[in-house]
């Protein structure tokens, strides 16, 4: 099944992804259409990005209006969209200071710098170590890769940024064992995404919070994938009642425009990054911030978070049904609309490819997990259709 677009793409685009063999052309609601007009029900949302689905009229209108008004000015000046967007992030998180970035990876870089700078400002040199988790994913730049607990991604690029120690996710003792006089921060995904959809336990996050308070460490929660309503809470940590010192956001923050943020609270907001310490040319320009601002408005207006709780419970029930019915589904993990089915004894990639043939887009996580991160606006009928298409692909 050769496709001229795919052949041409492979001629020109650096082959760093083994792409699925479809060429997508347009989207509407929770559906995507390829260049041949074939329809797909989308349970991937561009990797947890398109929370509002495709072509949301009010969102689209806001972006078009902003393009006509002003797209970019640099961070040397103020803009109304940036002011508004930052205020909405603050309000939703209860945290204090926002720095907008162009991606999740860059938000991680900023968070790591904030942790080191906080420590440097208070204790001087030498207190620079970061504790990260095995099976974590934080991005592909040298800094973000340094805290990513996946040997395969890291090895060819070593030596990476130094001073990183790894511990076991959800194992507080293993984290404590890595704390030294040089530790300045701990970074953890509230729900591990790429690693295979593993939610943190409450005891773990509470334990990390206490540890960080006792040792004056900066606690960083990576909410890039699990944040923005996906777990049924605006930010996943809010369910646990454990606030980080620094939170990273991206993916659904702009629902399709490239924007991320790192958000500081408490002592990290009071004393870490200062003028001259950090910057970005594009970050938080009026165009992306108009999107962020509209995303928060629409979440509120459409009750997205409450909706996720309801439809997430329905999805959970249906997925648990599949685990009961099929031996090769070992386990379901996740919360709300970030869910994973662990597949045993057959390649998960085969299921994904067959699902595509049946008009369903799903993705993988880790080496053997079927990942479901749909637009947050899916309905119970969409869940039923997904289950039907998935079962036909098994
Ligand atoms: C996707 C992701 C990142 C990296 O974000 P990019 O926008 O791809 O740079 C970092 N952390 C987590 C948890 C992610 O899911």
Image (tube, rainbow, N blue to C red):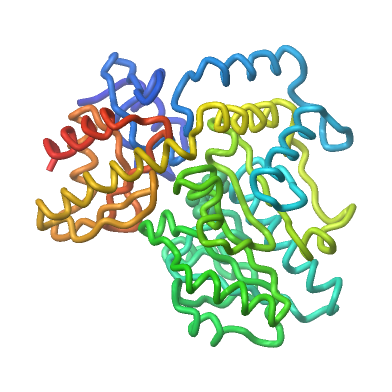
Residue, x 24% and y 47% (percent of image)?
Answer: 317
In the image, is 250 to the left or to the right of 40?
right
Where in the figure is residue 376, as x and y percent of width and height? 43, 35
Looking at the image, which is closer to me, 13 or 122?
A: 122
The image quadrant of residue 38 is: top left
Image quarter hosting the N terminus: top left
Image quarter hosting the C terminus: top left
Where in the figure is residue 374, as x and y percent of width and height? 38, 37
Residue, x 50% and y 32% (percent of image)?
Answer: 303
Residue, x 84% and y 61% (percent of image)?
Answer: 270
In the image, is 218 to the left or to the right of 367?
right
292 to 188, vertically: above or below: above
Where in the figure is residue 33, as x and y percent of width and height? 33, 19
User: Would residue 207 be seen by someone viewing this image from the given angle?
Assistant: yes
326 to 207, vertically: above or below: above
Looking at the image, which is closer to me, 363 or 387?
A: 387
User: Would residue 151 be seen by someone viewing this image from the given angle?
Assistant: no
Residue, x 37% and y 57% (percent of image)?
Answer: 197
Count of residue discs: 0
Where in the figure is residue 67, as x and y percent of width and height? 69, 16
In the image, is 26 to the left or to the right of 388?
right
Looking at the image, which is closer to me, 321 or 53?
A: 321
């Amino acid at each position: 099944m050769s496709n001229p677009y795919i052949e041409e793409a492979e001629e020109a685009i650096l082959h760093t992804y083994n792409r699925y063999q479809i060429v997508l052309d347009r989207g509407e609601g929770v559906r995507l259409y390829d260049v041949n007009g074939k329809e797909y029900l989308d349970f991937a949302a561009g990797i947890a990005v398109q929370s509002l689905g495709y072509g949301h009229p009010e969102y689209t209108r806001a972006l078009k209006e902003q393009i006509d008004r002003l797209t970019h000015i640099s961070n040397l000046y103020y803009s109304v969209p940036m002011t508004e967007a930052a205020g909405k992030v603050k309000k939703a998180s209860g945290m204090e200071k926002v720095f907008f970035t162009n991606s999740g990876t860059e938000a991680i870089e900023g968070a790591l710098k904030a942790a080191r700078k906080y420590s440097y400002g208070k204790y001087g040199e030498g207190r620079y170590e970061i504790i990260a988790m095995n099976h974590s994913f934080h991005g592909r730049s040298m800094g973000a890769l340094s805290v990513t607990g996946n040997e395969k991604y890291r090895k060819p690029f070593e030596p990476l940024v130094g001073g990183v120690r790894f511990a076991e996710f959800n194992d507080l003792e293993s984290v404590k064992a890595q704390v030294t006089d040089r530790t300045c921060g701990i970074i953890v995904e509230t729900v591990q995404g790429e690693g295979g959809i593993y939610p943190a336990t409450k005891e773990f996050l509470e334990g990390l919070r206490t540890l960080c308070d006792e040792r004056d460490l900066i606690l960083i929660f990576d909410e890039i994938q699990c944040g923005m309503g996906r777990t049924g809470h605006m930010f996943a940590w809010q369910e646990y009642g454990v606030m980080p010192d620094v939170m990273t956001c991206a993916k659904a923050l702009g629902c399709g425009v490239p924007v991320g943020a790192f958000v500081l609270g408490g002592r990290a907001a009071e004393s870490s990054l200062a003028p001259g310490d950090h910057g970005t040319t594009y970050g938080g320009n009026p165009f992306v911030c108009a999107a962020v601002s509209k995303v928060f408005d629409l979440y509120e207006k459409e009750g997205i978070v409450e909706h996720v709780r309801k439809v997430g419970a329905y999805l959970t029930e249906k997925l648990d049904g599949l685990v009961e019915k099929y031996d090769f589904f070992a386990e379901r993990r996740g919360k709300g609309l970030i869910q994973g089915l662990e597949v045993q004894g057959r390649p998960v990639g085969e299921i994904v490819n067959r699902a595509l043939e049946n008009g369903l887009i799903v993705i993988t996580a880790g080496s053997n997990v079927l990942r479901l991160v749909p637009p947050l606006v899916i309905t119970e009928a969409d869940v039923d259709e997904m289950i039907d298409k998935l079962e036909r692909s098994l």
